[in-house]
Amino acid sequence: MKVFNNSFTVGTNRRCELIDITDRIEKIIADSDVSEGIITVYCPHTTAAITINENADPDVVHDILLMLSELVPHKHKGYQHSEGNSDAHVKSSIVGCSKTIPLSAGKMKFGTWQAVFFCEFDGPRRRTVHVQITGQ
Amino acid sequence: MKVFNNSFTVGTNRRCELIDITDRIEKIIADSDVSEGIITVYCPHTTAAITINENADPDVVHDILLMLSELVPHKHKGYQHSEGNSDAHVKSSIVGCSKTIPLSAGKMKFGTWQAVFFCEFDGPRRRTVHVQITGQ
Amino acid sequence: MKVFNNSFTVGTNRRCELIDITDRIEKIIADSDVSEGIITVYCPHTTAAITINENADPDVVHDILLMLSELVPHKHKGYQHSEGNSDAHVKSSIVGCSKTIPLSAGKMKFGTWQAVFFCEFDGPRRRTVHVQITGQ
């Protein structure tokens, strides 16, 4: 059994943004020399998240960001956290900071349209993503 | 260490529907010959998801689908994605396409009322679910 | 490869509450004698969840609970489940009952502000949390 850990940084350019990080993860898989096992993609930030969705049409990303911002408004009279980014914390808990993907024959068991996205909810910032490959 | 992969298909009958797939996963666990480890249930689609919730009273499933549809409406003037299924993509990112369950003594460490559901948000369609059992 | 399972109980005091369980998980990691691998934190209840978010400012927890309760109201004319806790089931599926965290050098690969919370949505109750450490 091997446990291979690696990390990379992502620079975000807007307050809310989804950035396709699939290529970065595929490179770590290739470096890991593991072909069968589990890929954990982990965001160590509390105002960001990881999701898996479609990257073929950028309008899908637009619509995800739109609905999350309608559901969890940036400003709300009830928010008590003084940093002005309560919405980003809430979105982080709704979308989730960790995703697990099966690895088989050296590839993520992805569907045709799936990609992994880093979700920035309080940028622009410099962010880190941890990737762990566990298997054989 | 063993890594056991299997998949099955699910036929959905409505646009939005939760289908209990617990039995299908238990059969794959039995076939895997793994008794201690991790079960990853993975949906390779971007307009569907996997969740764990109660299967004893079907009204719970009704209420989950109701609230998701109130939160993320099918039609919205701001949606840009032209396929008319933006809501399904958003719900997929909110519920999540991957769930991880501890396996011990050959069984999922489930609570009394838990079951695994395939969440269809843009059916009816023929769908695939990947299950990976990693352990010993 | 080792698979180490342990569980603990959490007593909740309000209907909706987030309880920091990071210390309890760190103790299980120390007991496991595993330093590299995967930590699965699993909630076996269908009206509760697990999330990772900030524990430095308690106002963040307040704002997460506030927004979840605005999004998913306790009472709704469309709910059919007769136990009066449909909102708790919906919140459980939105936040998720399972979280996966990479373990490296004997520690969770956490960011500066991250903590693991048990999310009570239908308390007060006595609850159980399962923790599984898989690795070497």
Image: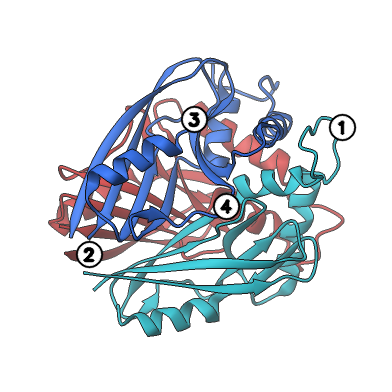
Chain colours: A red, B blue, C cyan
Residue B35, quarter of picture:
bottom left
- Residue B48: mark: 3
Q: Are marks 4 and 2 on the same chain?
A: no
In the rendered view, tell whether residue B65 sits above or below residue C99.
above
Task: Using the numbered discs, state the Cα–Cα distance from disc 3 to disc 2 in whole angstroms.
Answer: 30 Å
Q: Are marks 3 and 2 on the same chain?
A: no
Task: Identify the residue at horizontal 45%, vertical 61% (top origin).
Answer: A127
Q: Is residue C94 visible?
A: yes
Question: Relative to residue A124, is residue B29 drawn left or right?
Answer: left
The residue under label 2 is A4
Q: Chain of mark 4?
A: B
In the rendered view, tell whether residue C1 sits above or below residue C16.
below
**Residue type for callout 2:** Phe
Image spot of residue B62 (x, y percent)? 68, 30
Q: Residues within 10 Å of mark 1 (few under 14, many from 20)?
A: few
Task: Identify the residue at horizontal 68%, vertical 19% (top origin).
Answer: B75
Task: Identify the residue at horizontal 59%, vertical 38% (top origin).
Answer: B55
Q: Chain of mark 2?
A: A
Q: Is residue A73 visible?
A: no
The residue under label 4 is B112
Image spot of residue C43 (x, y percent)? 55, 60
Q: Secondary structure at mark 4?
A: loop
The residue under label 1 is C77
Task: Using the numbered discs, state the Cα–Cα distance from disc 1 to disc 2 in whole angstroms.
Answer: 50 Å
